[in-house]
Amino acid sequence: MASIVELLLLLLLVFAVWIGSLKAQSLAPLVADDAIFRSSDGSSCPSPDPSLYHRPVIGILTHPGDGANGRLSNATNASNIPASYVKFVESAGARVIPIIYNEPEDLIIQKLKLVNGVLFTGGWVKTGLYYDVANKIFEIVLAKNDAGDHFPLFAICLGFELLSMFISQNPDICERFYGEDRASTLQFGISETSGTLFERFPPDLLTKMSSECLAMQNHMFGISPKRLRENRALSNFFKILTTTADANNDDYISTAQAYNYPVTAFQWHPEKNAFEWGTDKIPHTEDAVRVTQHTANYFISEARKSSTRPDPVKLLSHLIYNYKPTYGGYAGKGYDEVYIFT
Ligand SMILES: *[C@@H]1O[C@H](CO)[C@@H](O)[C@H](O)[C@H]1NC(C)=O
Ligand SMILES: *[C@@H]1O[C@H](CO)[C@@H](O)[C@H](O)[C@H]1NC(C)=O
């Protein structure tokens, strides 16, 4: 009996040694490579800067309508976010929560506690509920910053016009400009870019932005440097970073940044160069796309400084991933993809 057990054990042992030698053979080069990697880099990966938040989320306020003059939806309570703004934010390493302007106010307040920054898109509505909700969100952004959270706001095109109206408390503050459907240069009014949107733009790109048409414009209103200087509230709030001449050669402020808040305002469209194709005026050169990328990187680098740490589970049902964009580009104009909320 014992000898049979011994024989079986011996067979098992031989088999195990054989399998082991096969494994050793196949693993041998890997082990050697691993040793080489370890000898050239003995440490493990350093952990990312703990003072920054590396899972930032941005709230984007929806704008009334379907974003396509009724071609996509005629629902009276429809609102939209052009997908280019979502891609702009996502491309720099953040996720998006849509803040639907006509949803209950307590839900909007709840969402603002789950984000690390806010973006106001372009559009045209300057009255009613949309205006009031944007104004309220702007006040919350300022209050969060006053309370010590670094909470950035990017206000693009209409967003800039709305901020000018909120800050000056004058609904007629904006002036008529002829900036529809044209690419332009940005003329820098600052000698020092540190502490601004442009601080980490490569010098060659800054030079090109002032001499090549890399900034897409599409607006009928704006603020002249003169009007800003004449309005105490506006001139105390905003520093002019760049100006641009419209089709009549009149200068408007194309980029402004708050002195005391991480609030950046654009009359131009940094999101379009990489993500919108509805007009042939939008610049798509490599340099134009770099403008989109560096602008998005700046925004999200600001959001990473926010001390808000959203509950990772509460976040999920609010994320833009719960919605699908609609392709609206067949019309050959307007936005290519739009998220529509009804
Ligand atoms: C919305 O209404 C307009 C005008 O009646 C119509 O041409 C369009 O097809 C409608 N849009 C949709 C998505 O049904
Ligand atoms: C829009 O109207 C529909 C139908 O009445 C309703 O189910 C939906 O909740 C409304 N959406 C918003 C955002 O108000």
Image (cartoon, rainbow, N blue to C red):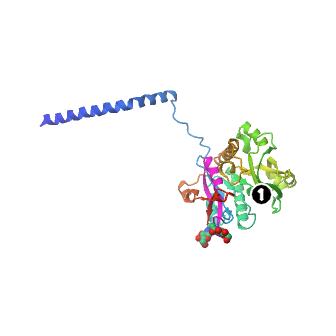
Question: What residue span does the magenta drawing correspond to?
Answer: 71-98
Residue 194 sits in quarter:
top right
Q: Nearer the viewer, residue 81 or 305?
A: 81
Q: Residue at x 69, y 60 (%)?
A: 137
241 relative position to 40: left or right: right
In the rendering, at what x and y percent does residue 325 appear? 60, 58
Using the rendered image of the protein, determine whether residue 77 is visible from the camera's viewpoint: no
For disc 1, the neighbor class at 10 Å (few under 14, some 14 to 19, many from 20) is many
Q: Is residue 285 above or below residue 18?
A: below
Residue 24: which quarter of the image? Answer: top left
Can you give x and y, in whole percent of width and height, for residue 297 in the image?
66, 45
Q: Which quadrant is the N terminus positioned in?
A: top left
Q: Name the residue type under label 1.
A: Glu
Q: Quadrant of the C terminus?
A: bottom right
Q: Secondary structure at mark 1?
A: helix
> Which residue: 16% across, 36% down?
5
Q: Quadrant of residue 210?
A: top right
Identify which residue, 194 or 340, lies in the foreground.
Answer: 340
Image location (x, y in percent) of residue 221: 80, 57
Residue 200 in view (yes/no): yes
| Residue 208 location (% of width, % of height) | 75, 40
Q: How many marks?
A: 1
Left or right placement of residue 173 versus residue 28 in this view? right
The verdict on residue 95 being magenta is: yes
Q: Which residue is mark 1?
A: 161
Which of 173 and 289 lies nearest the eye of the viewer? 289
